[in-house]
Image (tube, rainbow, N blue to C red):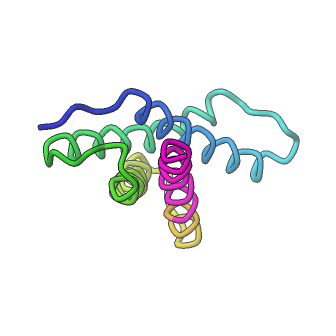
Amino acid sequence: MTRVDGRGLFFDALAVVVFVAIGRMQHDGDGAFPPDEVLRTLWPFLGGLLIAVVVLTISATTYSRVAAGGAVALLTALCGLALRYASGQGIAVSFAIVTLIVLGVLMIGWRLIVNTVSRA
């Protein structure tokens, strides 16, 4: 088993929060963020991230590597969508596609930035 980089976990959790915030801004056009709606949208994807962390930890994958970012994003998105569906929130195909793309860009993106900066 491998240890999870706390900084990496922070950035992945931040990616999930940013994803939810952007989505809520798109659907709550008045700019208000009702806490109950934000938490209702957020918890499945934080749960998905937790599952991704456990799977990567058990598989001894180096958490902050770029390749791990793809796995974290995919697991977070799929598990988050499954939890969302199981809780009765429903999922549209377009939402699932956007979820995979946005979480992929954010979770792989921060890893690419960190790797580029650390090489410089």
Q: Residue furthest right?
A: 30
Q: Residue at x 85, y 48 (%)?
A: 29
Q: Which portion, as a residue range, is magenta?
A: 101-120
Q: Position of residue 11 (x, y in %)?
A: 50, 36
Residue 78 vs residue 119, the one in the foreground: 119
Q: Position of residue 68 (x, y in %)?
A: 33, 53
Q: Is residue 100 above or below residue 73?
A: below
Secondary structure mainly formed by the magenta segment: helix
Residue 113 forms part of the magenta stretch: yes
Q: Position of residue 27 (x, y in %)?
A: 75, 51
Image quarter (top left, top right, bottom left or bottom right) of the N terminus: top left
Residue 96 vs residue 74, the one in the foreground: 74
Q: Residue at x 34, y 31 (%)?
A: 5
Residue 105 forms part of the magenta stretch: yes
Q: Residue at x 48, y 36 (%)?
A: 13
Q: In which quadrant of the rendered view does residue 47 lie?
A: top left
Q: Position of residue 21 (x, y in %)?
A: 67, 41
Q: Is residue 4 left or right of residue 119?
A: left
Q: In which quadrant of the rendered view does residue 17 lie?
A: top right
Number of marks present in the image shown: 0
Residue 107 vs residue 111, the one in the foreground: 111
Q: Is residue 78 above or below residue 4?
A: below
Q: Is residue 103 left or right of residue 68?
A: right
Q: Residue at x 47, y 30 (%)?
A: 10
Q: Residue furthest front?
A: 120
